[in-house]
Image (cartoon, grey):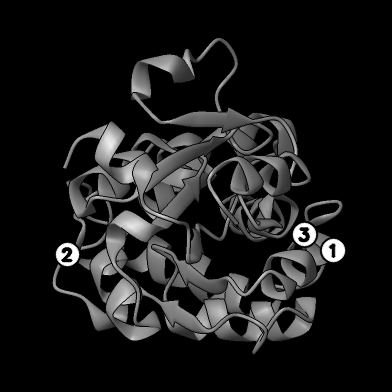
């Protein structure tokens, strides 16, 4: 579906990525990685150094923190240990990005459905959202546990639209990673870059081909208004 066709449909739903879009979770992920580094006799890394790797999940963060990948013999053991540590403290310092609580209230007040589509497993996502106080405010949560393929495959975005009872063309997907934008585009939604999220310094987000980029959660309200909501 063309951009013009998508933008002609009245907006009915807002779909959000979780880490780096709705919530700032980098400090807790860094805490878990640094505990793992300490167990390996390594010095801690700054949150700012690890932050750009958050969208890449455990694989990307372990590559940054320990210089290992799936091809390494210890990868599975260290990945599982990292996830165990993170499960114990996934809401230790995490916060909703400034202003997003009000944004969600206003969007819902306009009659928009809210969905979360994340590559974070359900066993981490649900406790985190509950601790942040934004669950069950969302109308649906789509995690990789429900899917054959994670983002950038569009399956999760399409499932969210199905569960919300809205057409993809009447939805917008907001994320801070090229995989979010690719998933939304393939599903037929509008797409928005969360420019305040976990984007590497110097990254040119205009190359991602999204319909818009926002600098803060509050900017989403004006953008949705422009799209008929």
**Secondary structure under badge 3?**
helix
Q: Residues within 10 Å of mark 3 (few under 14, many from 20)?
A: some
Circle 3 sits on which residue?
103
Mark linked to residue 102 = 1
Q: Residues within 10 Å of mark 2 (few under 14, many from 20)?
A: few
Q: Is residue 189 visible?
A: yes
**Image check: 36 left or right of 81?**
right
- Contact (CB < 8 A) between labels 3 and 1? yes
Q: CA distance from mark 1 to mark 2?
A: 32 Å
The part of the image, by quadrant, that contains residue 223 is top right
Q: Residues within 10 Å of mark 1 (few under 14, many from 20)?
A: few
Q: CA distance from mark 2 to mark 3?
A: 30 Å
Q: Residue at image x 17%, y 64%? A: 149
Residue 219 x %, y %: 73, 39
Circle 2 sits on which residue?
149
Q: Is residue 69 visible?
A: no
Residue 215 x %, y %: 71, 30
Q: Residue at image x 86%, y 54%? A: 99
The part of the image, by quadrant, that contains residue 22 is bottom right
Q: Nearer the viewer, residue 201 or 135?
A: 135
Q: How many marks?
A: 3
Residue 68 x %, y %: 34, 41
Q: Residue at image x 64%, y 86%? A: 127
Quadrant location of the C terminus in the rendered image: bottom right
- Contact (CB < 8 A) between labels 1 and 2? no
**Image check: 64 left or right of 48?**
left
């Amino acid at each position: 579906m063309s951009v013009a066709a998508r933008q002609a449909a009245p907006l009915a739903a807002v779909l959000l990525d979780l880490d780096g879009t709705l919530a700032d979770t980098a400090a807790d992920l860094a805490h878990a990685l640094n505990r793992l580094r300490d167990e390996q006799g390594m010095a801690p890394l700054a949150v700012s150094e690890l932050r750009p790797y958050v969208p890449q999940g455990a694989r990307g963060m372990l590559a940054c923190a320990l210089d290992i990948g799936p091809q390494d013999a210890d990868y599975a053991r260290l990945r599982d240990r990292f996830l165990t540590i993170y499960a114990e403290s996934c809401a230790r310092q995490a916060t909703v990005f400034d202003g997003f609580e009000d944004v969600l209230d206003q969007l819902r007040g306009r009659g928009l459905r809210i969905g979360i589509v994340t590559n974070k497993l359900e066993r981490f996502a649900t406790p985190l959202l509950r601790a942040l106080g934004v669950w069950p405010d969302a109308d649906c949560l789509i995690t990789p546990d429900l899917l054959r393929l994670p983002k950038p495959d569009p399956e999760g975005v399409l499932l969210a639209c199905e569960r919300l009872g809205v057409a993809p063309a009447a939805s917008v997907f907001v994320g801070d990673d090229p995989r979010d934008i690719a998933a939304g585009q393939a599903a037929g939604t509008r797409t928005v870059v969360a420019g305040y999220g976990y984007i590497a310094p110097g990254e040119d987000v205009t190359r991602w081909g999204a319909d818009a980029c926002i600098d803060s959660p509050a900017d989403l309200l004006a953008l949705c208004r422009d799209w008929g909501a």
